[in-house]
Image (cartoon, rainbow, N blue to C red):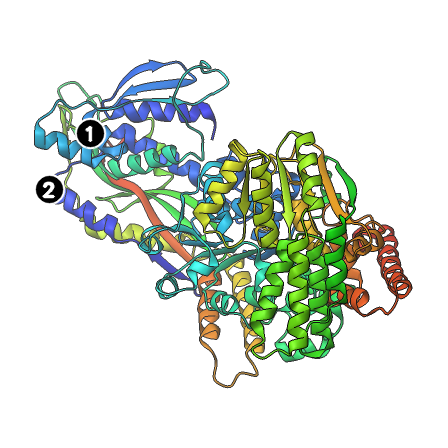
Amino acid sequence: MKINISSNSEWNDEFLQKIENDGPWGNWELYKLAVQMEENLIIPDFEGLQAPKHLPHLTPLPHQLEAAKQVVEKMNGKAILADEVGLGKTIEAGLILKEYMIRGLVKKVLILVPASLVSQWAFELNTKFHIPAVAQRKSYVWESCDVVISSIDTAKRAPHRDIIFNQEYDFIIIDEAHKLKNNKTKNYEFVQNLKKKFCLLLTATPIQNKVEEIFHLVSLLKPGHLGNASLFSEKYKGKGRNIIEDEHLKELVNTVMIRNRRADTGIEWTKRHVETITIEFSPTEQALYDAVSQFKPISEGTKGSTFSALTLQREACSSREAVYYTLKNMKAKYEDPSPDYMEKLDDLFTKVNETVQNSKAEKALELIKKIDDKVIIFTEYRATQLYLQWYLQQNGISSVPFRGGFKRGKKDWMRELFQKNIQVLIATEAGGEGINLQFCHHLINFDLPWNPMRLEQRIGRIHRLGQEEDVRIYNFATKNTVEEHILKLLYEKINLFEKVIGELDDILTKLDISNIEEYLIDVVGESKTEGEMKIKMDNFSSLIQFAQSMKEGEVHAATGNS
Amino acid sequence: MQQQEIHDFLRTYFQANDCEILNDGGSHLTVQLSIDMDKELMNRPFYWHYLEKTGGIPNPAVITFITNPEQAPADLKGEMIHFGSPRLHQIIQSTKKLAGYTRLFENAPPVKSGGNNPLFPWLTLNVKISYQCDRKKDTFMSIGLNLISGEIMEGFHNRLLPIKVTPKIPDYSFTLSPLIMPKSGLARLDTYIRTSFEGDDHLWAEEAMKRWQDDLKLLEHFYKDMEEKSDSYFTEKEALKAQYEPNIRISIINGGLFYLSERALG
């Protein structure tokens, strides 16, 4: 077999030059040292990990070392790292990157992460791995630095995009890669066009809703591994999340994906304590809730209408500000509404104005004072977030907001403020992902998302490796509202909150429901009577419980990394 | 690599570069850098530029390295040095740079009193051979070529280690002129190195080729339905080549000319 052999002639030229000039010559002691040290740096085997030897201050967990080894030896440096939240995917990625850099196979590296995580990645790679990673802030960085960290949103924009496409990257890491599940997005297209010699995709939730998501992720990494698009959808379409039941597909996916589960790692986790706090509306709040429940918003199709009505109800459980904001948008949206509709809207505005207190906020204040420690409050609504910040401030409690839309510097700053000086951090959903707040162990769910995975992610912000205290979660639910239905009929029945992180993920994988949120909206919104809804919810939760009992019987067989 | 070995390496490096060792505690080392070494290691060109322009008094840095944190005094401030620390790798690179080429003479006692010692010219190379695909391993090779007889010896560096050498030609010694010119000597050594692994079984490369072919097949399949292939197809194809294509790289660590007596190599 013909193998390309290369050598560097520069040494020869300089040597001949030195002979001609009679020196200068290196000293014998140094000459011997150079050989001795180089011999130490020789890597005698294709197999095995060199990185741990170089990182005496890092003690990776066994599953992290195993993952790194597997990616290098079995997966040829292209893998989806899909450990459950909080098992240290960053450490695994760092180990793998370090390994390739030590072996001299990788020099130029691009790391794409959510904006809120850029500084954190830079910090971890520099301090834990001695990898000189640079957060991209100036455009010359792309060319002049070898290891660059950026958000995908920055990277895909001009002028960065073209500069990036002109670089020869050896290694690409993408954090929170589940955001690339849709192959129609600009982000997907951008990543698809990157040259990926070695590549890691990091996500805790490789499949959120549809089986196509895993197809798109794998196709980014290794096009063709799961066949081409038409063939794949022919074979698996409509199979929902239970595709992992398909032995063949499972096997294929497992050759490019590593998924460690909390239960398999044998790590001792701190406990979760969950407390549901039921809140009763004040009369004016009740009046607002009732009014929006009666209201039928104009929208295309019945589904849309149900959705808007439910949104208003859920918002009324959060704050009147959230309701106001949505109503205002509704009003602005229709150019030519009927007088009747306008009247109804105006009536609702009046109800908003008449609402004089926020019972949940009062409860939150009381709780925060009692806790007397750092607290994170999650809300679905930005209007609620603003209101809460104002309300707490009125009552002498310092807080900082946190949103996905913040610029990176601001996110870092908010996190820092929260860690050092401020008692409360108020985050909206978009801010929930990818920020690590394990220095805090109290979490208030001011309102609840209807997608259990999102709830997981919220909790995962504080219940992760590095959390030393038991985690306390307080769920707020207003009595006799949609919120209470979801909490009591679903989340509590399936013991969602007590589950260790990721277990739920497992269970949902078994269910053939393509979109849980849509399903719940359907159940809650379209049921004609409360009885009907209860029955449907019961059915749904027994389904989950059934899947759970199935799972207990075959913990490893089902979805382990065989 | 043991911490003790790192400690010894640092000490030798700084001594060989004329830096004063201010304190050697076994677990830590404090060094007064010379001006040249400050320029080499401290990366502060502006300081030196400024100083040279203004004619100020140079104040090269003092650095403390901690090689064994468990035994070093707890309040000692210094840089932790371990196998993976960037500073160690900087110093290794510097060592290679400062000692890439040498020419030395054996300091041999005369064979008989009053006689003169003939010294034979040897050209030597220490090389690292890297076998690279999506994985990589290295081997080390040290060879020497007698520039008169054309004899080639392996494991040359280890044979040199016990010999007393000096940078200046010793009294009562004289060098024999090479019959093989250094340039063609280098060519001979290069050929020798290349033939050394020619006969090896290159299973690693065959396996890499197979992995490459497998991934290529998948890629073709993925884009099968696309009549005019998109850019991403070609990018991906390039990436597979970069990932898997086997090659062997020869890199020279250092080398030089050694003038040795006939008996030196036994």
In this view, B127 is above or below A545: above
Mark 1 lies on residue: B36
The image shows residue B185 at horizontal and vertical percentages of 24, 49
Q: Are marks 2 and 1 on the same chain?
A: no
Labelled pair 2, 1 in contact (Cβ < 8 Å): no
Q: Could you tell me which residue is drawn at 60 percent across and 45 percent down?
A: A388
Q: Is residue A130 above or below residue A239?
A: above
User: Considering the image in quadrants, where does the C terminus of chain A appear?
Assistant: bottom right
Disc 2, SS: helix
Mark 2–mark 1 distance (CA, rounded to whole Å): 22 Å
* Residue B109 at x, y percent in the picture: 21, 21
Please indicate, yes or no, whether residue B156 appears anywhere in the rendered image: yes
Q: Quadrant of residue B260?
A: top left
Out of B137 and A208, give the one closest to the viewer. Answer: A208
Q: x%, y% of residue B198?
A: 43, 57
Which residue: 81% across, 70% down?
Answer: A526
- Which residue type does callout 1 highlight? Asp
Query: In front here: A301 or A415?
Result: A301
Chain label for disc 2: A
In the image, A46 versus A447, the foreground residue is A447
Name the chain under label 1.
B
**Given this view, does label 2 or label 1 mark the residue nearer the observer?**
1
Q: Is residue B42 left or right of residue A326?
A: left
Badge 2: few (under 14), some or many (20 or more) residues near its Cα, within 10 Å?
Answer: few
Instruction: Return the residue found at the far bottom.
Output: B227
Q: Which residue is mark 2?
A: A21
